[in-house]
Amino acid sequence: MKFSAADLAAYERDGYVFFPELFTPDEIRALTERVPTIFAMDRPEVVREKASGVVRTAFAAQHYDDAFARLARHPNLIEPAKQILDGDVYMHQFKINAKAAFDGEQWQWHQDYGTWLNDDEMPAPRALNVAIFLDDVTEFNGALMFVPRSHKAGALDAGHDLQTTSYPLWTIDHPTIARLVAEGGLVSPKGKAGSVMFFHCNIVHASPGNLSPFNRNIVYLSLNACENAIRNFKRPDYIAHRDFAPIVALGDDALRSTEVAR
Ligand code: SIN
Ligand code: MN
């Protein structure tokens, strides 16, 4: 897939573009059937919620699972990222965020670039996220909230929150969030499994806990321009990757073939 001129303009204006049901149920099944095995792994990449012990995030699954390795090189994700970032891209981070039924906890208000700047010394906000819904995302199971156009505010002041959840995050104070929401409003894209959202690394976002009986697994590819590689390697490489080589996209059948992509 390529972005149209209208898609590119919407991304520049709003900081995100949402594509409902971009992947078919069969393509998504190739991924979801792998998730229980990944979440059962006892390895540092698999981070658990403090309170309940259920999985919060599984980092770098593209390095140890073939189906996720194929997703990480899917042309529907890589080609638009190259258009948006105007050049070759590499994978800065890859994670499956499980917001488990009943126990999945919040993600505080933040910009992803805040963490990538403060922790990884990423030179410029020339990076983006692609979210791929593995489950239906509804108003009940912890859908993300975004402040449209907040990516234009640049990198905002952030404090390092090591307490609120089981994953340290550079978070933004409430008066700033209130001001940005007064200007830009809020959106919360929801949709069936297979829906995909591209969003700017400076768009402000958060998500509440999941009190529903429905899991909410979402995969995130964080793609960075190869020319914008990080300079500080203090975080483990399964969180902030060090392979800055351009990603070569697979064919359109990437999730329908069994070819090994790693
Ligand atoms: C994120 O902000 O990076 C993840 C939030 C979520 O998965 O709900
Ligand atoms: Mn984020």
Image (cartoon, rainbow, N blue to C red):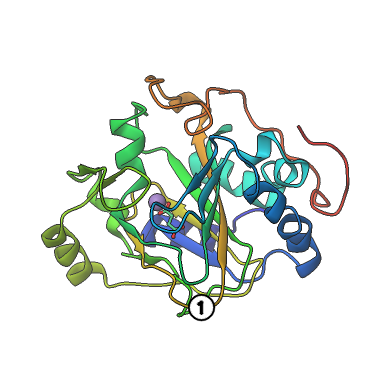
The quadrant the N terminus occupies is bottom right
Q: Position of residue 122 (x, y in %)?
A: 37, 29
* Vertical position of residue 38 compared to residue 121: above or below: below
Where is residue 135? Give x, y as percent. 62, 68
Compared across the picture, whether 24 is left or right of 200 comes to right
Q: Position of residue 144 (x, y in %)?
A: 42, 66
User: Looking at the image, which residue is at 71% across and 63% down?
Assistant: 23
Where 253 falls versus 72 (above or below)? Answer: below
In the displayed structure image, the side of residue 168 where residue 178 appears, left or right: left
Question: Residue drawn at (51%, 49%), measured in percent from left and top?
Answer: 57
Q: Nearer the viewer, residue 32 or 101?
A: 101
Most distant residue in the left direction: 175
Q: Residue at x 61, y 39 (%)?
A: 42
Indicate the secondary structure of the residue bearing disc 1.
loop
Which three-letter amino acid code belongs to the residue tagged 1? Thr
Find disc 1 in the rendering and name its residue: 138
Decide: is 37 above or below 92.
below
